[in-house]
Image (cartoon, helix red, strand yellow):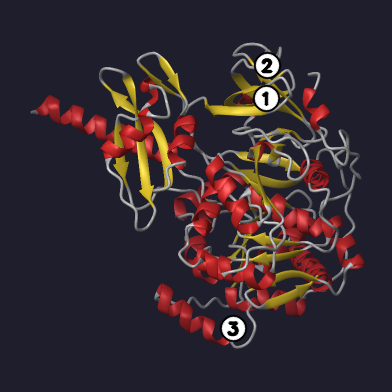
Amino acid sequence: MTNKPWLSQYPSEIPAVIDYAPIPLQDFLTRSAAKFPKKTAIHFLGKDITFNEFYESALKFANYLRKMGIEKGDRVAIMLPNCPQNAIAYYGILYAGGTVVQTNPLYKEREISYLMSDSGAKAIITLDLLFPRVSSILKETQLENIIVTSIKDYLPFPKNVLYPFIQKKENGIVVKVEHRGIHHLYTEIMKSAQAETIPLDFDFEKDLALLQYTGGTTGPPKGVMLTHKNLIANAEMCNAWLYKSKEGEEVAMGILPFFHVYGMTTVLIFSVMCGNKMVLIPKFDFKTALKEIDKQKPTLFPGAPTIYIGLLNHPDVAKYDLSSIKACLSGSAALPVDVQEKFEKVTGGKLVEGYGLTETSPVAIANFVWEGQRKRGSIGVPWPNTDAAILPPDSAEPMKPGEVGEIAIKGPQVMTGYWNRPEETQETFREGWFLTGDLGYMDEDGFFYVVDRKKDMIIASGFNISPREIEEVLYENEAIQECVVAGVPDPYRGETVKAYIVLKEGYSLTEEELDTYCRANIASFKIPRIYEFRDELPKTAVGKILRRALVDEEKKKAEQNQQEQLTS
């Protein structure tokens, strides 16, 4: 254990240690339905669903799963955008004793097949539009049942009537699925199933609530095993961190997708635990988000830097009232200081950076939202019940403040391991420490800083160069909307620094101007040697810029050039 210098920085309202009730995760919904039965739990495109309706629908779903043969420990997949069915299915699977397998609805057949095969999922709930994709891979998996729903199932009149026409216009088709054999209609389940509780044997420490697959940037995606304890611990930590939030009174903006662990914990689980309303957006666009913020007055807004950047740079942002927002915890990527300051000025709320991984459920470290010191460029301090340290390459002995090493985490939110991958699990832990793969350091006060991912560090002419440091400088240029920096192959330097730039609408910038700007702000060996202007950057569904995709692109170019030179 470290000496935890960060605890001296905690405001008096945040406890260093939290006790967790050893209950199933779904008990949070049971409790909130009893305490706030008529309160709105979910707002979805004009439709309101109470906590009691949410609870009874989840029980119906659970009982139907049982009739289909789902038993305790069986995996059931959810392949949906943010919509009421997603939340209902999530808790329904838990009430049935199953384990949720979250699946990105943007996935293609090959990716779906891999996740279903690897997890051994026996059933899946998905949209009518995605049904052809799922049904085509049945023979390759253990899937026995497909439950089909539609966005229109929870739309208010007249949107529900108009939706099929909109669907056909946007997608060119309207998929019709019959309720027969292994195909089941969600609407029929809600009509026929009973809302009865199901008795379960339960192990707080061992029972899996979730198999959450990682992005697979270094190979095939791995199933992260998260227990009821892992997820409850992280939700309780979040509650302690947001000590000014009031039970049953907050409104959470559900832009982050639930198939991403960050959106699932900070919006879905946290809102259900606290009896708060969720405002769900199935398909993110900035105009819809601004309208919903203006109308629904969210107070909590977990997000990613690209989401905040997009809202700030929308031409109509000044037309909407964003002043209801009190607290935003940013995750999934580094939060540029310039973006933080601008967003706080526009909303009047607080925007702070948090840090974590799928393997930590996800949050392990964060900045203080209200009282407490804020340090420029820091990801903050460890959450209650959480220990963090900087470790050298081959030891579990924490390094001294200021020394750069690998960030390591211990705590009740840390996964039990990777699904069916004991060797990879073993490699990820060192004497009880979970190794994050991120390089960083801790200062004397216990604040942590990310230097970069180990695999993202640029080594040019023997110098170690942090992409994040250069990105911070670039984001301070008023003409730049988005940027990412990566190391690309260079015959002389080994690697050289390249910056990919997306300009704000109406702005112009030349390579020469950028070079002059960078030379005034960073050391010469860190200055990008190549600039590429793009209309957009590749991103994950949660808005994280895919640096590795750009690096792979550059490697392919270099290989092609080399091949052309050899054949010419």
Relative to 192, residue 292 above or below: above
Distance of mark 2 from mark 1, alpha carbons?
14 Å
Left or right: residue 456 versus residue 392 is left
**Mark 2 or mark 1: whose residue is earlier in sequence:** 2
Identify residue type, mark 1: Ala
**Is 127 left, or right, of 564 in this rendering?**
right
Amino acid at dot 2 = Pro
Q: Residue at x 77, y 58 (%)?
A: 271
Question: What percent of the width, then of the height, locates residue 275?
Answer: 83, 62
Q: Nearer the viewer, residue 212 or 413?
A: 413
Quadrant (top left/top right/bottom left/bottom right) for the C terminus? top left
412 above or below 246? above
The answer to which of marks 3 and 1 sits earlier in the sequence is 3
**Mark carried by residue 160:** 3
The numbered mark at residue 401 is: 2
The residue positioned farthest toward the left in the image shown: 568
Residue neighbourhood size for the residue with mark 1, other residues' Cα within 10 Å, grouped as few (<14), some (14–19), many (≥20)? many
Q: How many marks?
A: 3
User: What is the C-alpha distance between the residues marked 3 and 1?
Assistant: 49 Å
In the displayed structure, 328 sits above or below 430; it is below
Mark 2 element type:
loop
| Residue position marked by numbered label 1 in the rendering | 408
